[in-house]
Amino acid sequence: MSKPIVTAITGLLAALIVAAALVLMAMSLKSGLLQFGGADRVVSVKGLAERNVEADLALWPVSFSVADDSLDSLQGKIEEQQDLVRSFLLLRGFVEDDIQLSMPKITDQHANTYGNTLPPERYRAEVTVLVRTRDIESVQSGMQTVGELVKSGVALTQNYDSQPRFLFTRLELIKADMIADATRDARAAADQFARDAEAEVGSIRRASQGYFSIEDVDPYTPQVKRVRVVTSIDYSLR
């Protein structure tokens, strides 16, 4: 066989080998890309759980004020008014352990007044009797009859701090169930997305739980609370 023919055959074989290698590399690269793309198919969803609950703790501050020129006389008025408030509360079913007396806030009105006109009494005391109880109904009914204290001579005061508060303190009793509800809600959203994408939901890639929020259902029923939690979950798709 002549040398030119041998050279041509050798070149052809080399070209075929290179072509075959390129084909194999392309197939391998395509397979790798498909696998990589499949592994990265992820859907991110959020799950919501809400539940209405009744408050289980009430804080009811009954606030009043008294004034006098003498601190001794002022203290006597404070004690007299506190006794009236305590009697009012005991008659409505509260017990002594429910009633807490706060330290009076005493102001020297003459020292804090500018100009020539001074208040008739030098000292003024603001006092709060706090009711802390799990008897929510007694607090609600007591608030409806608080006008009787005014009739007995108690000068009630109203401000932001004297507003009753209703709390829900037993979150731990429903926490696990609500997280499960939120997770099911997230899975339902992932299933719907997968059906639309003609895929199937795989395992959880990442999950995070939001904080629990407890708010009034509305401004008119503060004793009813809405507990809410949101979970964020990433599912793989296959």
Image (spheres, grey):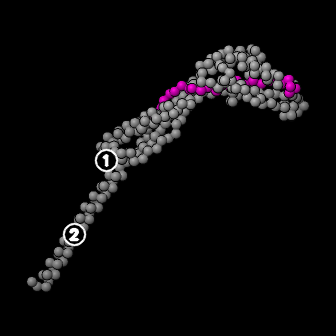
Q: Amino acid at mark 2?
A: Ala
**SS state under label 1:** loop
Q: Is residue 77 left or right of residue 141?
A: right
Count the labels in the image: 2
Query: Looking at the image, is 7 positioned above or below residue 163?
Result: below
Q: Residue furthest right?
A: 116
Between label 1 and label 2, give the one nearer the viewer. 1
* Magenta residue check for 182: no
Q: What main secondary structure does the magenta stretch of the protein show?
A: strand
Residue at image coords 86%, 27%: 71
Residue reaching furthest to the left: 1
Q: Which residue does the numbered mark 2 point to in the structure image?
A: 19
Q: Quadrant of residue 107?
A: top right
Q: Quadrant of residue 215?
A: top right
Dot 1 or dot 2, earlier in sequence? 2
* Dot 1 amino acid type: Arg
Whether residue 220 is visible here, answered yes or no, is no
* Residue 238: image tag: 1
| Residue 21 image point, x, y percent | 23, 68
Residues packed near mark 1 inside 10 Å, few (<14), some (14 to 19) or many (20 plus) = some
User: What residue is shown at x 75% (from left), y 18% (from top)?
Assistant: 84
Q: In this view of the protein, can residue 118 be seen by the observer?
A: yes
Q: Viewer-proximal residue, 204 or 170?
A: 170
Residue at x-position 20% and y-position 73%: 15
Nearer the observer, 177 or 37? 177
Q: Residue 25's x, y, as percent? A: 26, 65
